[in-house]
Image (cartoon, helix red, strand yellow):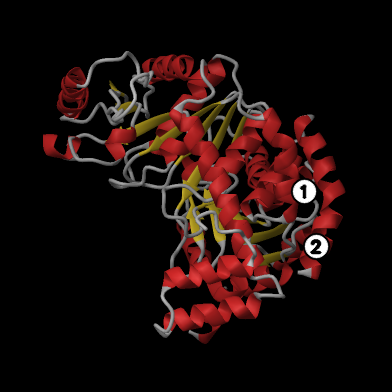
Amino acid sequence: MAAGVKAAGASQPDATALVDAALAGDRLALARILTAVENRTPLAEAALRRLFPLAGRAHLVGITGPPGSGKSTLVSALIAAVREQGRAVGVIAVDPSSPITGGALLGDRVRMQAYSTDRDVFIRSMAARGHAGGLASTSTAAAAVLDAAGFDLILLETVGTGQSEVEVAAAADTTVVLEAPEMGDEVQAIKAGLLEVADIVVVNKGDRPGAQRTASQLRAMLVAVGRAGAKGAKGAGAGAGAGAGAVRPRPKEPEVLLTTATTGAGIPELLGSLDRHRARGHEASDTPARLARAEAQVWAILADRLRADLHAPAIREATAATMREVAAHELDPFAAADRLLTELRVPDPRR
Amino acid sequence: MLLARHNRRDMTDRPLKVLIAKPGLDGHDRGAKVLARGLRDEGFEVVYTGLRQTPDMVVTAALQEDADVVGLSILSGAHMTLVPRVTAKLREAGMTDVLVVVGGIIPDDDVVELKRAGVAETFGPGTTIAEVAEYLRANARPTA
């Protein structure tokens, strides 16, 4: 721990200098901050504390969908369209880490070469490092760094996802779910999970046979059904929640768009749709996505701090002993948690 | 097997980030892909950038990724033109601590020149992935 404290003290001036440089447009300083964030070093905390108040201006867009559905190619097409408008764009592209070796092959840049030397495009690959939700555990913090550095649009590309990796919806203001043509029937479209968190559904590879049909099936199932469900529950307007009691969360009604990312077809329409969604969300800072993101960040830090406290030299052995008792079924996990909280002298609010 | 487990323990704290790039016009990236995959299995985080990179593209990618290692794969014979440009531009960009290695068929005389230009090591045909991994682990200096 002594080493950790010393490192934290020593890194303080470094963080200030790095943050100043990054804010002045030094891209290497920006990259170094992202590395610190990714590795959760003491420097990262110091940097994030300074950068957080400057963030919150960018439009954070999550791009998710199955492997091979064209996420990276779509990101590349979006970069081109956004650069035509003169806006600076940051990309955080996540690929999975090996559960066996911890290594990773980060291949998203291959599709993003066209604008790779443009100063107002910053692309960073991240390995998920065992985090299961489709992003890395530090992706939200990395996005905040790019946000503070002045990038107007930040694209968060997830690992290839299946049906339930919905974390990106909390990390982003607008969530785009990609589908490839002929990936499933109407029943797939009405299953709970990933499609439910979409603000925009994109059927990519629009030049393939069946793309139109896939789009219209999704439209029928997501939009029409969502509307029919909403009609019954209608009373107040748009989720004002004035009435006490059960305000049930309503399904989103995503726009369904057709794109061919390789040719750029449908990309201007997607950009227009993103901008419309941004305009709707930006009026309030307490949109559900923003609150969820705030909560997720604070909870993650709380859990980290708790873990670090429980591994502090003074009580490390007591923690380990408690874990061993649970492993041997001599102590139940609830009693163990209570004991460890007492150990930390956290007053139990239930008592 | 024993080696793999040992490596894995080394890697848990902070995997090294390796950028693999193919500068120039040759279209043979099988070797680069095999190495990328092999280093992944050795516990590295490998960014693969694809074919036909200009020195500027390689340097920008290395900078944005804050790579610990830049591995250049060249089979076209243009290494004496391309590699010194990459190392010079890396220095210009302030990336003085990045480890640059080159893979390909490099004549011995050229190796001396390349090392003078800032290349740490070259790896010719017959090099095993384990050898490359061991070299990178021993010589890369992570920035954070």
Callout 1 secondary element = loop
Mark 1 or 2: the one toward you: 2
Q: Is residue B6 left or right of residue A228?
A: right
Give the CA distance from mark 1 to mark 2: 28 Å
Q: Is residue A320 left or right of residue B41?
A: right
Which residue corresponds to the image point at 42% horizontal and 85% vertical from the top-left?
A: A328
Assess whether mark 2 and mark 1 are in contact (beta carbons under 8 angstroms): no
Asked where in the image residue A327 lies, by quadrant, the reply is bottom left
Callout 2 secondary element = helix
Please tell me which residue lies in front, A28 or A143.
A143
**Residue A24 pos. (x, y %):** 79, 29
Q: From the image, tell me which residue sits under label 2.
A: A5
- Work out whether A272 lies above or below A158: above
- Mark on residue A95? none
- Mark on residue B95? 1
**Residue A130 pos. (x, y %):** 47, 60
